[in-house]
Amino acid sequence: MEASIILLFIILSATVALVAILAFRKKPEHPAEISGNNYAEGLNLLLAGDRSGALNKFKETVKHDSRNIDAYLKIGDIFRGFEQVEKAINVHKYLTVRKNLTKKQHNLILNSLALDYIASKEYEKALQVIDNVLEIVKDVPWAHQMKFDIYESNQNWGKAFQAYKEMMRKDNTLKSTKLAYCRVQEALKLLKNEKNKEAFTKFKEAIKIDSTYAPGYIYLADFYESEGNQSAALETLREFVDKVPAQSHLAFGRLRDILFEGGIYGEIENLYKEIIDKQPDNFVAYLALAENYEKKGELNMAIEVCEQVIERDPDNKAAQKYLVRFYHEKGQDEEALKIAIQLLEEPEKPNYQSELDLTEFTGD
């Protein structure tokens, strides 16, 4: 009897132990759970900059859950980032034929596919993808921007102009400066092809589009000069100085050259004074006037103008450098040395640009 009780106790204990083991043993993960974990890890690795690790995790993700469209998208994008563009194209093209895609997913897939074609320099195919997007939904900002970028990078300025014009219709915060930029670039390209009349029209149109766009005036003036029409060049530059006083210094060199070539030496001095009267803080005009006095041998007047600049802007290093030069030319080396030491002891502030750089006038 006692033996039976002991045996029963052992059986019950074993049963309880077995139940406990079965209860607490970890259940195998469901494929969806495995996929979700891999996807989350892939995103974290991507954020950390480990694209190779992320790629492996996203591949594991779709292995267990082929419905994860975003994982496929990221696989293709990573391939493109690794310059394996053909693989990227294959992944994203495969996604375009998937069923039951949401509008957002379809939009993202086509965005990535267009970027793939741009990366492979297949611009026509990229444009076809973009046009397909815009046929379905007219207002897709990335599609319009990408279209403009393709035309700009390929210097197709006429189409770039139209693409940006379309962007402006959708976004009233965009400025017309970019349109003027396209017209000037188009004009410069026409000039290279010796299509001078067409180029002239584009320069004029650029100014009409944006009356504050400096390159429109500067290049139009250069065009007039190349045609031997100094009076029209001078008139264009004067118009620029009046309409865009903040950038008038870009015209000073050209104005001086035209007036000197025409033998109208005194006119440039009057022009600088006129600008200073209208724009008392246009320090470049002051310094241009000082340089003009120097050429005439009127060093006292040149020094006086520089001192006026320093009175209004004590940290103006350009004026101080001119003073060093003028004092040295006058034989006042002690005064020149004193200012030069100050210049060495203090950091220099950025100076005004005196020449035109079209890359800084893109409208961005």
Image (tube, grey):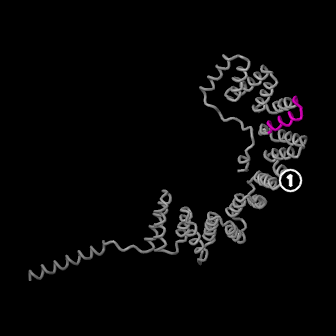
Is disc 1 surrounded by few (<14), some (14 to 19) or many (20+) residues within 10 Å? some
Confirm whether the magenta stretch covers residue 253: yes
Task: Report x, y in % for residue 180.
Answer: 79, 52
Q: Secondary structure at mark 1?
A: helix
Examine the image and state in which quarter residue 242 appears.
top right
In this rendering, position of residue 68 left or right of residue 113? left
Quick one: 233 or 140, which is closer to the camera? Answer: 233
Q: In the depicted view, which residue is nearer to us: 100 or 133?
A: 133
Count of numbered labels shown in the rendering: 1
In the image, residue 164 lies in the stretch drawn in magenta: no
Q: Position of residue 339 (x, y in %)?
A: 65, 22
Residue at x-position 83% and y-position 39%: 241
- Residue sitting farthest toward the left: 2
Up-down relation of residue 83 to residue 346 (above or below): below
- Is residue 354 depicted above or below 91 in this figure? above
Part of the protein shown in magenta = 251-266
Q: Position of residue 288 (x, y in %)?
A: 78, 30
Measuring 53% from the left and 67% from the top, which residue is drawn there?
75
Q: Label the magenta part by its dominant secondary structure.
A: helix
How far across and down, in percent of the image, does residue 282 sit? 77, 33
In this image, 119 relative to 208: left or right? left
Quadrant of the snapshot with the N terminus: bottom left
- Which residue is tagged 1? 196
Q: Say which quarter of the image contains residue 270.
A: top right
Please state which amino acid type lies under the numbered disc 1.
Asn
Q: Tell me: 254 left or right of 146.
A: right
